Amino acid sequence: MTMLETPVTTDSRLAAIVDDVVEALCGVIRTHGVTAEEYRTATDWLTGAGQQEFQIPLLLDLFLSTTVDEVGASADGGTESNVEGPFYIPDMPLLEWPYVLPRREDEPGEVLVFSGSVTSTDGTPLAHALVDVWQDNGAGEYSYFHPGVPENNLRGRLLTDADGRFELETILPVPYEVPTDGAVGTLLAAMGRSAFRPAHVHVKISHEAAQPLTTQIYFAGDPWLEDDVVVGAVKPELVTSVVWSTEEREGDSRATCSYDFVLPPIA
């Protein structure tokens, strides 16, 4: 049997999606009167982006991932979900009480105590829920992705107590700029778009009696809340306030914030 005679299994869902994508793009071409020169510029840009490491995933994350999150979000009254982002690493260490995210002695940034609760939509505390946390440091860097940052830095998992509560000491995250030295950076600049993300903490929560949650917590007053490069990621329901302590601990200023997570029960 030759290659031309090899049976092909048709994926009808894939075919329908691709047809709709093509139709939508053709509609854009007609609506904006895209010229042959502009079309060639776009194909050259895509070719270049595909030859540069991480540029296509970055493009999709910035412009499309929040819509995928929206489509898959639960409508059962729980905490708003959010995109996982590209910096998640599974199976990080399970921390011991008192919970402190691993960090260097000279870690850049201010100390933050992040506390809250995990409950079901009926108010029942979810004891021993698994809370997976990861974030950047005070220099906007993530472990495993930025040179010089130790493995597991500012990453860890913890369990809520019998009342569904948790408290975690970490570092206050900061806004950061996504990579702009490649094709996506060129596109953002041409569009006049910011390349910054507001400060945030990533959280994944799971419990045997509840639907899992992946989300991000943002901070009131951040200058990039209204201009996030990840289109539609910031949701008002996910913004909390940082309270600064007048005391000092070990020479560091100290901040606190709180957020109560609500998970719908498993259907």
Image: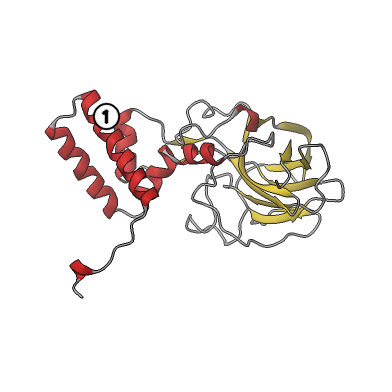
Residue occupying the far bottom of the picture: 1
Binning the other alpha carbons within 10 Å of mark 1 as few (below 14), some (14 to 19) or many (20 upward) gives: few
Q: Between 254 and 63, which is closer to the camera in this rendering? A: 63
Judged from the image, the secondary structure of the residue bearing numbered disc 1 is helix
One can see residue 105 in this view: no
- Name the residue beneath numbered marker 1: 28
Quarter where residue 252 is shown:
top right
Q: Is residue 236 above or below residue 112?
A: above
Residue occupying the far right of the picture: 162
Work out which quarter of the rendered image holds the N terminus and state it.
Answer: bottom left
Q: Is residue 96 above or below residue 47?
A: below
Quarter where residue 19 is shown:
top left
Q: How is the image coloured?
A: secondary structure
Q: Measured from the top left, where is residue 96 in percent x and y?
A: 78, 60
- The kind of residue on which mark 1 rests is Val
Q: Is residue 64 above or below residue 132?
A: above
Residue found at x 17% / y 36%: 39
Tell me: 49 left or right of 2.
right
Q: Measured from the top left, where is residue 70 in percent x and y?
A: 53, 36
Residue found at x 33% / y 61%: 9
Tell me: 33 left or right of 213.
left
Q: Between 188 and 126, which is closer to the camera in this rendering? A: 126
Q: Measured from the top left, where is residue 226 in percent x and y?
A: 51, 25
